[in-house]
Amino acid sequence: DTAVSQTPKYLVTQMGNDKSIKCEQNLGHDTMYWYKQDSKKFLKIMFSYNNKELIINETVPNRFSPKSPDKAHLNLHINSLELGDSAVYFCASSQRGGADTQYFGPGTRLTVL
Amino acid sequence: AQTVTQSQPEMSVQEAETVTLSCTYDTSESDYYLFWYKQPPSRQMILVIRQEAYKQQNATENRFSVNFQKAAKSFSLKISDSQLGDAAMYFCAYRGNTGNQFYFGTGTSLTVIP
């Protein structure tokens, strides 16, 4: 009965490849997020979707493309992977409106060789 | 833009003792929300405690409590009776009353010494 799940947990790939990370939440939340946590543990928001609509798009290379087929899913697709993309990527969700706490997934550690 | 500062990259505490982690933030908003998240080695981000800025009373959750000083823009986390399982990275986070964006601090790594 995991609230926010991500697959895969670990992803090792070569530079130049295209990869996707999937995220699903079963909390009935309206808003979902993608964060990137770098090697220094700094957590920075990348995207936010509300009811399948993009509402936050920070300065992220356009090689990163989020896709939300429905409000319970927010997948992250990355084209032409680069060494600097190596990080832990976290998906999160919250109920829009009010003091909505964010609930995080377990993270996906991406390593680009 | 809002910023969240955690000035202690690392802290340690003896088991059963009390430790306080500091957090300051910068904002021009009068209504907002503050959070402490814990990230153990498993990497999962776990909500520890939440504070609404309009509430004067400090939030408490079992052994975890905060000291919220709105005028000073300070939001420290006190962990009482520290346990080995408390060892983790702790992140302070800010969320404004409008918009969905959270701003995170750089984290404090807490070590609990048996």
Image (cartoon, coloured by chain):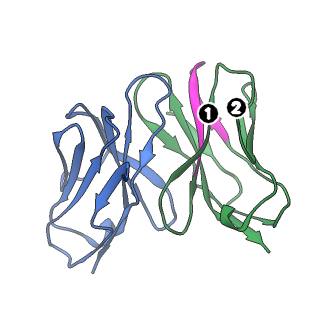
Please give the chain letter of the residue carrying mark 2.
Answer: B
Q: Earlier in the sequence, mark 2 or mark 1?
A: 1
| Image-based side of B106 in relation to A24, left or right | right
On the image, the x and y values in percent for residue B71 come to: 74, 24
Give the structural element (helix, strand or loop) at label 1: strand
Q: Residue at x 50, y 57 (%)?
A: A42
Q: Magenta stretch: residue B35 in it? A: yes
Instruction: Assess whether mark 1 and mark 2 are in contact (beta carbons under 8 angstroms).
Output: yes
Q: Looking at the image, which is closer to me, B12 or B81?
A: B81
Please give the chain letter of the residue carrying mark 1.
Answer: B
- The quadrant holding residue B100 is top left
The boundaries of the magenta stretch are B24-37
The label on residue B95 is none
List the residue tagged with mark 1.
Answer: B26
Q: Quadrant of the C terminus of chain A?
A: bottom left
The label on residue B73 is 2
Q: Magenta stretch: residue B41 in it? A: no
On the image, the x and y values in percent for residue A54 come to: 23, 35
Q: Is residue B15 above or below residue B98?
A: below
Of the chain colours in the picture, the one used for chain B is green
Q: Is residue B31 above or below residue B101?
A: above
Q: Is residue A59 above or below residue B107?
A: above
| Label 1 environment density (alpha carbons within 10 Å; few <14, some 14–19, many ≥20) | some
Of the chain colours in the picture, the one used for chain A is blue
On the image, the x and y values in percent for residue B66 come to: 73, 39
Q: Residue at x 74, y 63 (%)?
A: B83
Q: Residue at x 24, y 53 (%)?
A: A61
Give the structural element (helix, strand or loop) at label 2: loop
Give me the C-alpha separation between circle 2 and circle 1.
7 Å
On the image, the x and y values in percent for residue A83 come to: 29, 73
For the residue marked with disc 1, what is the amino acid?
Answer: Asp
